[in-house]
Image: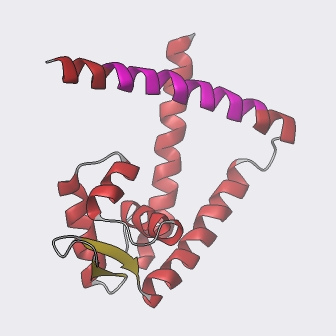
Amino acid sequence: MRRSVMISYMKTMKLHRCILEMRLKNTGVYRSQHQILMILTDHTNLSQKELAERLYVSTATIAVSVKKLEQGGYITRIMDQNDNRMNKLCLTEQGRHMVEISREYFMSVETRMFHDFSKEELAVMEQFMNRIYNNLSEIQMDKDMTERED
């Protein structure tokens, strides 16, 4: 039973990702770059390291995306006033416009994805997803503790 649930979950997430990528393709900005723009909308002046931590990816992975977004005029780097060695990332006007476009795409997919679910069903689904997340977080904490002991 668990295996079939896992397969359904993975198929659903893959299809969701494919649909978003298809919708976002004509913007010239990749899905992962849209995620960066969305985070910078809600959390201004993050460093690349802080951004990487929020996305659970390496700083090297973030560096490539940040460089492309900067070259595209979507973000800019501002030197940290407290530490000249550190840059903070900020959205440009073009970046804010792209976030508006992204949100429209994401909301249209989300609306269609959940269109025939009741509020109660969505609440139960959210509870299940939170439990899964908490269980996975415990695994991550165990991993972190093991690495510290080594």
Q: Is residue 23 left or right of residue 75?
A: right
Q: Is residue 139 above or below residue 40?
A: above
Along the viewing direction, whichever of 46 and 33 lies nearer the viewer: 46
Extreme-top residue of the structure = 1
Q: Residue at x 52, y 56 (%)?
A: 19
Residue under the point 71% across and 55% down = 112
Residue at horizontal 48%, vertical 66%? 43
Locate residue 35, reporting x and y percent. Answer: 44, 61
As rendered, which of 94 and 105 lies closer to the eye?
A: 94
Q: Is residue 125 magenta?
A: yes
- The question of residue 104 being in magenta is answered with no
Residue 124 drawn above or below residue 2: below
Magenta stretch in the rendered image: 124-142
**What is the quadrant of residue 83 in the picture?**
bottom left
Quarter holding the C terminus is top left
Q: Position of residue 79 (x, y in %)?
A: 25, 80
Q: Residue furthest front?
A: 82
Residue 114 rendering spot, x and y as whole percentages: 73, 47
Tell me, yes or no, if residue 93 can be seen here.
yes
Residue 110 percent location from the top left of the image: 66, 55
Viewer-side residue, 63 vs 13: 63
* Residue 27, placed above or below residue 49: below
